[in-house]
Image (tube, rainbow, N blue to C red):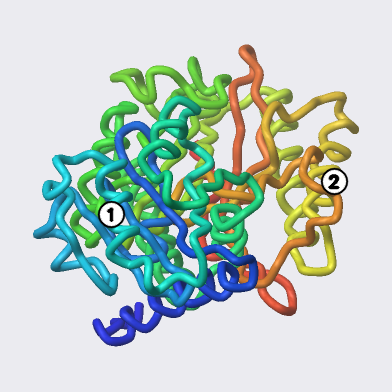
């Protein structure tokens, strides 16, 4: 992917904060508080500053930002914020950090209204209210935090580039897995899971997007097998599933491969055909002209012809998190269309204890004129 300079990245993050600042100014909000901790992870801090985790971030209505990171040294290297104050200065207490930072940056606000994170537990929220009694504190599910989620719905060019790089590396890994299967070098679920872990690091990824799910025919009936992988045979005769993602510059891919090793039963062949048909039919609807509900209903209708039902949603957004808004589901807001810049999975699947599981999952970038499939997962057939 294109190499972004520090100046370019600084401009990107500042632009995102300025957009939030504009929203705050319009709505009479002085400052917005974000807290990322072991109690609750908030990807908004990475979105606005590039800092990975464990920090308090306050953004004021003019876009001015103060980041209070637990790891000051990492933040100095990788974070983009107007001011850094180490979290240790406040003895790692979020309330003390927020109180002091608000007083430092208050002159940047237009009034005293402060929006606190909606994910604060109620008792913690009351403690913040007491500590910030000179501010008009709010905790809204439909304010700045939702605005941030909505902004993240459509990726900017940097986010698209990072996700495409994760997708490219994931494709390389899938190709290597198929090669090693055919050579007989992958024999167990553990073999393939550890290959992914090793290869993604070799290719410059930070980590896998989630714990790899590898399930041979005896376990592939589970949507998400537990344990995630074992030392059982993989692939073996029947249907085996592999679900994994890799993270590049914070952005993850998400793909699922089904390995069909013959001879297969008629029921297994029919299941493979149904999933492939649902995938192909639904992909046509991943365009700005269509709603997410339309795509989800199409998958249901394909499976209904065989009196089968998919037990999970058709897809979900990806980005800084493996599961992001929106869900491609019949329960999603019926007015929500696919939006250019959105990156969503397409993952029809069917599962049966006797037949086994089949899922085909790729990541799809919605464009102005349609879509672009940025990963190349597939059903791998073995004799």
Q: Which mark is residue 375?
A: none
Taking the image as drawn, is residue 123 in sight?
yes
The image shows residue 327 at horizontal and vertical percentages of 67, 45
Q: How many marks?
A: 2
**Residue neighbourhood size for the residue with mark 1, other residues' Cα within 10 Å, grouped as few (<14), some (14–19), many (≥20):** many
- How packed mark 2 is, by other alpha carbons closer than 10 Å (few <14, some 14-19, many 20 or more), is some
Against 317, residue 212 (above or below) is above
Q: Residue furthest front?
A: 134
Residue at left 42%, top 44%? 133
Task: Determine whether 26 is above or below 337 in the image.
Answer: below
Horizontal relation, residue 40 to residue 27: left or right: left
Q: Nearer the viewer, residue 155 or 109?
A: 109
Identify the residue position indicated by label 2 in the image. 298
Question: Residue 314, how many percent across, how many down?
Answer: 69, 42
Task: List the residue tagged with mark 1.
Answer: 52
Quadrant assignment for the N terminus: bottom left
Residue 192 lies, in percent from the top left, at 31, 36
Q: Is residue 283 toward the left or the right of residue 6 in the image?
A: right
Q: Is residue 364 visible?
A: no
Question: Could you say where residue 370 lies in the image, as x and y percent from the top left?
Answer: 73, 72
Q: Residue at x 25, y 54 (%)?
A: 206
Q: Secondary structure at mark 2?
A: helix
Kind of element beneath mark 1: loop
Q: Give the camera-side residue of 46 and 310.
A: 46
**Which numbered disc, 2 or 1, marks the residue closer to the eye?**
1
Q: What distance separates the C-alpha of mark 2 from that of mark 1?
A: 38 Å
Q: Are marks 2 and 1 in contact (CB under 8 Å)?
A: no
């Amino acid at each position: 992917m294109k190499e972004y300079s520090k100046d370019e990245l600084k401009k990107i993050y500042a632009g995102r904060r300025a957009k939030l600042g504009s929203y705050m100014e319009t709505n009479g909000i002085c400052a917005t508080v974000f807290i990322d901790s072991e109690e609750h992870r908030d990807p908004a801090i990475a979105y606005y500053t590039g800092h990975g985790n464990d920090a308090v971030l306050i953004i004021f209505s003019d876009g001015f930002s103060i980041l209070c990171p637990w790891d000051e040294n990492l933040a100095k290297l990788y974070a983009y914020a107007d001011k850094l104050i180490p979290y240790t200065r406040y003895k790692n207490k979020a309330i003390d950090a927020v109180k002091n930072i608000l007083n430092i940056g208050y002159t940047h606000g237009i009034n005293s209204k402060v929006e606190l994170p909606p994910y604060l537990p109620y008792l913690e929220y009351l403690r913040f209210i007491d500590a910030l009694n000179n501010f008009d504190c709010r905790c809204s599910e439909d304010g700045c935090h939702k605005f941030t989620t909505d902004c993240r719905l459509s990726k900017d060019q940097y986010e698209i580039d990072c996700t495409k790089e994760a997708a490219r590396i994931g494709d390389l890994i899938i190709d290597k897995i198929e090669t090693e299967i055919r050579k007989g070098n992958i024999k167990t679920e553990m073999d393939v899971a550890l290959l992914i872990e090793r290869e993604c690091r070799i290719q410059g990824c930070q980590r896998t997007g989630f714990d790899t799910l590898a399930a041979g025919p005896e376990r592939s009936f589970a949507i998400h097998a537990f344990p995630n992988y074992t030392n059982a045979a993989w692939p073996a005769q029947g249907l085996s599933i592999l679900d994994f993602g890799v993270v590049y510059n914070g952005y993850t891919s998400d793909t699922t491969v089904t390995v069909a090793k013959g001879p297969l039963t008629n029921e297994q062949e029919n299941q493979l055909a149904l999933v492939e048909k649902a995938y192909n039919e639904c992909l046509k609807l991943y365009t700005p002209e269509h709603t997410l509900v339309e795509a989800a209903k199409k998958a249901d209708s394909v499976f209904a012809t065989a009196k089968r039902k998919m037990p999970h949603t058709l897809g979900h957004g990806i980005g800084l998190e493996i599961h992001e808004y929106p869900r491609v589901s019949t329960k999603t807001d019926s007015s929500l269309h696919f939006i250019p810049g959105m990156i969503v999975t397409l993952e029809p699947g069917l599962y049966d204890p006797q037949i086994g599981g089949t899922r085909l999952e790729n990541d799809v970038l919605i464009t102005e004129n349609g879509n672009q499939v940025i990963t190349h997962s597939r059903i791998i057939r073995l004799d």
